[in-house]
Image (spheres, rainbow, N blue to C red):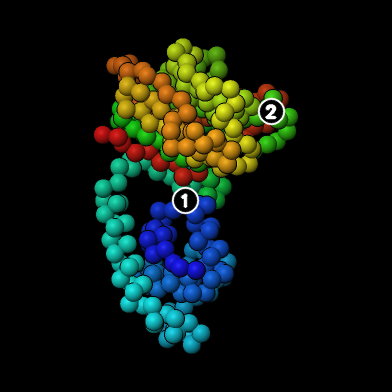
Amino acid sequence: MKADFSEIARYLGGDLSRLEERQIESRIKNDKEFAAQVEIGRMIVGHWKDDLEGEGPRVDRNGPLSRKWGSMAVKGLIIVSAVILISATVYAANVLFDSTIFYDSFRSKTFDRSRWKTPPDIIVNQGGGVRPEAGFVRLVNRGYLQPDRTFPAKISIEFEWQWNWLGLDPLYSDHLTVALRTNAIPNPDFFYEVSDGIVIKFDASTHAVSISGADGNQMEITEGSTVRMPHDEWHNIKITDDGNIVSVFIDGPEIVNKHHNKPVVTLRKARTSSDGFGIVVYNRELQQFPHESCIRSFRVRTLE
């Protein structure tokens, strides 16, 4: 199979999603020629650490290339080296001009308190909160995820989301909420919700996405059940806020074609002086049954 050298460079640079990384790692284990090309790439760009979970084919770094791989590695060395170096240069340029201002891959199994605020005690005491796992973070029963910083007025939020089916679908299917333009002040009546800002809700029970003020006013919602969000499937979500219009994009295995690369719902609402600059992500309240959502690859970019 022909190698995509730009993809190899992005893999070595850590710029792929977890799903794409798994596909690369599976190919490394099953395609010796491709594994050799990746290994050569590691040598070129200085990535000596083997981050594969299993033992795939490898080049002996302390001696000559094995005979098994020698001919193919030497034959492709000049071409592969040139292409990967060019790709790595392009990748480096993208990093330099990247508009990302906040990112967490959730690769470690610990909650990074340098990036995120600790969930409110009242949530933790009731068994909810955040459970970090390798590659993603799990929001359980009013899970509450808040970056430990504020953001500019014009931003985009990008992440992957899935909700887990734990019973009584669809009545107790999870809801995921993303609040922006918020001061992150808890609602006195529903402490797991915010009292100000704009909230975007992904309702897996009705397969609908809505945008409204935190007070429920000025709501826009998708029509019918056109945004189908099946359980245990990853969905790519992007929310943009240019200060006047908030737009929501979602892609997943059952999203209808008309929504691909187009916002499923928008809200025209100009930013005001009282609006905050925070972001909070939380899932559905506990109603006698557990609810879970998983988040991975959380990124915020500036639109300015």
Mark 1 crowd level (few <14, some 14–19, many ≥20, 10 Å Cα) = some
Q: Residue at x 44, y 67 (%)?
A: 3
Viewer-side residue, 228 vs 195: 228
User: Is 32 placed left or right of 46 in the picture?
Assistant: right
Q: Is the C terminus in the top left, top right, bottom left or bottom right quadrant?
A: top left
In the rendered image, residue 140, in percent from the top left (x then y), is placed at 61, 34
Q: Which residue is mark 1?
A: 17
Viewer-side residue, 247 vs 135: 247
User: Is 37 placed left or right of 273 in the picture?
Assistant: right
Q: Name the amino acid, label 1.
A: Ser
Q: Residue at x 30, y 46 (%)?
A: 98
State whether residue 116 appears in this view: no
Q: Please, is residue 294 above or below residue 16 in the view?
A: above
Secondary structure of the residue carrying numbered label 2: loop
Mark closer to the chain start, 2 or 1: 1
Secondary structure of the residue carrying numbered label 1: loop
In the rendered image, residue 76, in percent from the top left (x then y), is placed at 38, 77
Mark 2 crowd level (few <14, some 14–19, many ≥20, 10 Å Cα) = few
Q: Name the amino acid, label 2.
A: Pro
Q: Quadrant of residue 146?
A: top left
State whether residue 213 appears in this view: yes
Q: Residue at x 58, y 41 (%)?
A: 253
User: Is 120 placed left or right of 268 in the picture?
Assistant: right
In the rendered image, residue 50, in percent from the top left (x then y), is placed at 47, 67
In the rendered image, residue 138, in percent from the top left (x then y), is placed at 57, 40
Q: Which label belongs to residue 51?
A: none
Q: Which residue is mark 2?
A: 170
Pointer 2 with pointer 1, Cβ within 8 A: no
Question: Real-space Cα distance between discs 2 and 1?
Answer: 29 Å
Q: Please, is residue 33 above or below residue 163 in the view?
A: below
Q: Quadrant of residue 49?
A: bottom left
